[in-house]
Image (tube, rainbow, N blue to C red):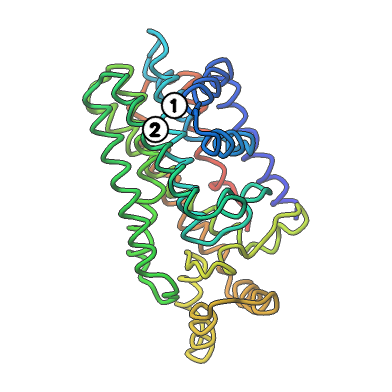
Amino acid sequence: MGSVIQLKKQINNSYLDLRNSVEDKLVLVDEKMISKLKSNVDLVHKMTEYHLRTGGKKLRALLTLGSAKLSGYNKGGRDINLAACVELIHAATLMHDDVIDNSEIRRGKKTLNSIWGNQSSILVGDYLLSRCFEMMVEDGNLEVLKLLSSTSTKIAQGEVLQLQHKGEVDMLEETYFKITSSKTAALFSAATKVGAILGEKESKYKEALEFYGKNIGLTFQIADDTLDYNSDLKAFGKEMGNDFFEGKVTLPIILLCQKISNSEKKILKNLFYKKKREKEELNYVLNLIKKNNIIKDCYKKADHFINLASNALSVFEDSKEKKILKNLTTFSIERNF
C-alpha cells in the first residue's frame, strides 16, 4: 500500500508543478472558454455552463501552455486562445463519448446526456467543435489550423474504430494502440506541438514535442484504463469497473485474454458480449487480473512510452520548463508493483 500512496503523491506533485508554472494563464484560459461558449439559445447556455462547472484537470490545456513556455513563446495571448481551443475539442469528444458509451457519471457528476438526452448532447458537442474552428481561424496560423483540424479527424476515426471492435476481448494489442493513438494521444500530441509552433521553433523541436505529447497521451490512457481494474486503489475511494460495465475492452482485458485458459477466455468473451454486466462478474474479472499480474504488465507497457516521452525532450536545453514537463513523464518509472 505504501508504494501506491507514494505513486499517488508523485502524480499529484508533477501535475501541480505544471499547473503552478502557468497558473496565471490558466485562469485566462477558463475565461476564454466561458466567453466563447456564450449562446443566446437557453439550452446551449445551460449545458455548456454545467459542463464547465464539472471541472477536470485541464491537462491538455496545461500541456499547450507548458510547451509554449518551453519553446520561448511570450508575445501575447495566442497560447491562451489555443489552449482553450484544445480543451474544448477534448470537451466535445467527452460529450460524444458519453452518448456512445451510455455513460451516466463523469467526474463524479451526472453526464449531460443523462440529464438532457443524447440528441442535445451530440448537438452541443458539435457546437463546441464549431467554436473551436472559429478560434483556430482567429489565430490565423495555417499550420495550427491544419494540425488541429486533422487532429479532430483522427479522434473521430478512433471513436469509430473502437466502436467497430466493441466487445472483442481478443483484440490485438496493435488495434488497441491504433485506437488509443487516434482517440487520445492525437490531441495530447497536437497540444504539445502547438506550443512549439507558437515559439516558432525549428522542425526538430516541433517533432520532439509532438512525439512527447503522443507518448504522454498513450501513457495516460493506459494508466486510466488500468486504474479501472486496480483493486489496490480501493483505499482511495476509486470507483472501479466503469469500463467493464460499459462493455469497453481496454488494455487490462486484452492482456488478460492472452494469459488465461480457453475456458476462462470463453467466459470473458460471453461477459463482454452481454448487454449488461453485474457486480459479481466484475469481481470475477478482478480476481483473474490479480491472479495473472495484469496490472504490473500494463504498467510495463506504460513505462515504454514514458521513456520515449522523456527522451524526446533531450533536444531542448536544460531549463525549469523542461524539468517540469519531464517530471510529468516519470510517475510510472519508479512504481514498485
Give me the disc on residue 319. none
Q: Residue 83 is drawn in which quadrant?
A: top left
The crowding category of the residue bearing disc 2, from other C-alpha atoms within 10 Å (few below 14, some 14 to 19, many at least 20), is many
- Residue visible at 60% across and 22% down? 20
Where does label 2 land, which residue? 191
> Residue 30 appears at what percent x and percent y?
55, 24
Q: Residue furthest right?
A: 235
- Residue visible at 45% across and 40% down? 90
Secondary structure at badge 2 equals helix
In this picture, is 188 found above or below 252? Answer: above
Secondary structure at badge 1 equals helix
Instruction: Name the residue type under label 1.
Output: Ala
The crowding category of the residue bearing disc 1, from other C-alpha atoms within 10 Å (few below 14, some 14 to 19, many at least 20), is many
Q: 157 or 218, which is in the foreground?
A: 157
- Identify the mark nearer the N-term, 1 or 2: 1
Where does label 1 land, which residue? 83
Quarter of the image containing the N terminus? bottom right
In this picture, is 228 found above or below 35? Answer: below
Quarter of the image containing the C terminus? bottom right
> Residue 53 appears at what percent x and percent y?
64, 34
> Residue 105 appears at what percent x and percent y?
63, 54
Instruction: Name the residue type under label 2.
Output: Ala
Q: Residue 254 is drawn in which quadrant?
A: bottom left
> Residue 86 appears at what percent x and percent y?
42, 33
